[in-house]
Amino acid sequence: MAARKDSKSQATIPPYMKAISGSLGGVVEACCLQPIDVIKTRLQLDRGGAYKGIAHCGSTVVRTEGVRALWKGLTPFATHLTLKYTLRMGSNAMFQTVFKDKETGKVSNHGRLLSGFGAGVLEALAIVTPFEVVKIRLQQQKGLSPDLFKYKGPIHCARTIVREESFLGLWSGAAPTVMRNGTNQAVMFTAKNSFDVLLWNKHEGDGKSLHPWQSMISGFLAGTAGPFCTGPFDVVKTRLMAQTRDGEGGLKYKGMVHAIRTIYAEEGLVALWRGLLPRLMRIPPGQAIMWAVADQVTGLYEKRYLLNAPL
C-alpha cells in the first residue's frame, strides 16, 4: 500500500498534456494582450520620438488608425503563441525527464534551468522568429488605408519577405531571439515551480489543484525577471526583424552585436531597454493568464489519471 502511494506521488504529467495546456493558455493570452504588444513594438521602432509614452502611443494609434489597429498582427500572434506554448511546455517536460533523479523522480533547480533554456532555444528557432518577423512587419505599418500598406496580411507578408529577402529573411534576428527566449524560459520555469512550492506548497503530481488566482500570482511573479534580463535582446530582435534592404540592397544592422553597438552609439544605453514598461505590462500578465489556464488543465489530469480522485 505504501509502495503504491509512493509511486503515485512520483507520477508526473506527460509532455503531451503539458503541450495541450500550453496551447489553450496561449489562445486566451493572445486575445487579451495583443494591444500591449502592438504598443511595445511601435515604441521600440520609434526613433524620432513621435510617441511620448505608453498612453500617448496607444491613444495616437486609436486616433489615427482606429481601435482595430491595436489588434494588428493578431492572427500571426495568436497562432505563434499557441504553437509556441505547445512546443515550450511539451519540450520543457521532455527535457526535464532527462534531468530527473531516478530514485526520487524530482528535478533540481539546475535541471529546471537547463530544461527551460533548451525549450526557449527550440521555440525561438522553430516558431518564434518567423512568426515575429511577420507580426512586426505588419505592426510597423502606419495609416488608415490598408490599400497603401506594403503587406496585405500575414500570408502576403511572408511571401513578400521570401521573394525580396530570401527564405532566410523570415529568420532575421534569430540570434537575439534565441538568447532572449532561452534566458526567459530558464528563469520562468524555475521561478514558477519555486513560487508554487513557497506560496502554495504545490508539488507536481501531488494531486493538489491550485485556484486560478493562485496560478496567476505565481505566473505573474515568475514572468517579471525575464524582461529586465533580456531587454537589449528584445530591442535588437525587433530592429533586425523590422529592417528591410535599402535602395542599394544594404542593411543598417549587420547582426546582433553590430546592432547593439549601433543603438548604443546613436541612441544611448537607455535605448537598449526601450519598450521595457510595455513588456512588463504584457509578459507578467500574459504568464498569469497562461498559467491560470494551463494549471487548471493539468490539475484536472492529475486528479483524474494520476490519483484517480473524483473531479
Image (cartoon, rainbow, N blue to C red):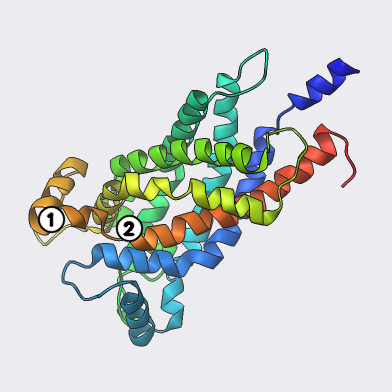
**Is 134 on the left-hand or right-hand side of 202?**
left
Q: Is residue 99 placed above or below 57 in the rendered structure?
A: above
Quarter placement of the N terminus: top right
**Circle 2 sits in a helix, a strand or a loop, which is it?**
helix
Q: Which residue is mark 1?
A: 268
Please name the residue shown 31% across and 81% down the image.
143
The amino acid type, in three-letter code, at marker 2 is Leu
- Assess disc 1: are there few (<14), some (14-19) or many (≥20) residues with their C-alpha within 10 Å of its C-alpha: few
Q: Is residue 205 placed above or below 241 in the rendered structure?
A: above
Q: Can residue 239 be seen at all in this image of the molecule?
A: yes
The amino acid type, in three-letter code, at marker 1 is Gly
Q: Nearer the viewer, residue 203 or 155?
A: 203
- Assess disc 2: are there few (<14), some (14-19) or many (≥20) residues with their C-alpha within 10 Å of its C-alpha: many
Please name the residue shown 58% across and 57% down the image.
289
Q: Which residue is mark 2?
A: 276
Tally of numbered tags: 2
Q: Is residue 6 placed above or below 281 in the rendered structure?
A: above
**Is 20 on the left-hand or right-hand side of 129?**
right
Q: Position of residue 96 (x, y in %)?
A: 57, 26
Q: Position of residue 115 (x, y in %)?
A: 50, 29
Q: Position of residue 53 (x, y in %)?
A: 29, 72
Please name the residue shown 65% across and 40% down the image.
18
Q: Position of residue 44 (x, y in %)?
A: 27, 62
Q: Can residue 159 be seen at all in this image of the molecule?
A: no
**Is 228 on the left-hand or right-hand side of 88?**
left
Choose the circle earlier in sequence order: 2 or 1: 1
**Circle 1 sits in a helix, a strand or a loop, which is it?**
loop
Q: Nearer the viewer, residue 134 or 279?
A: 279
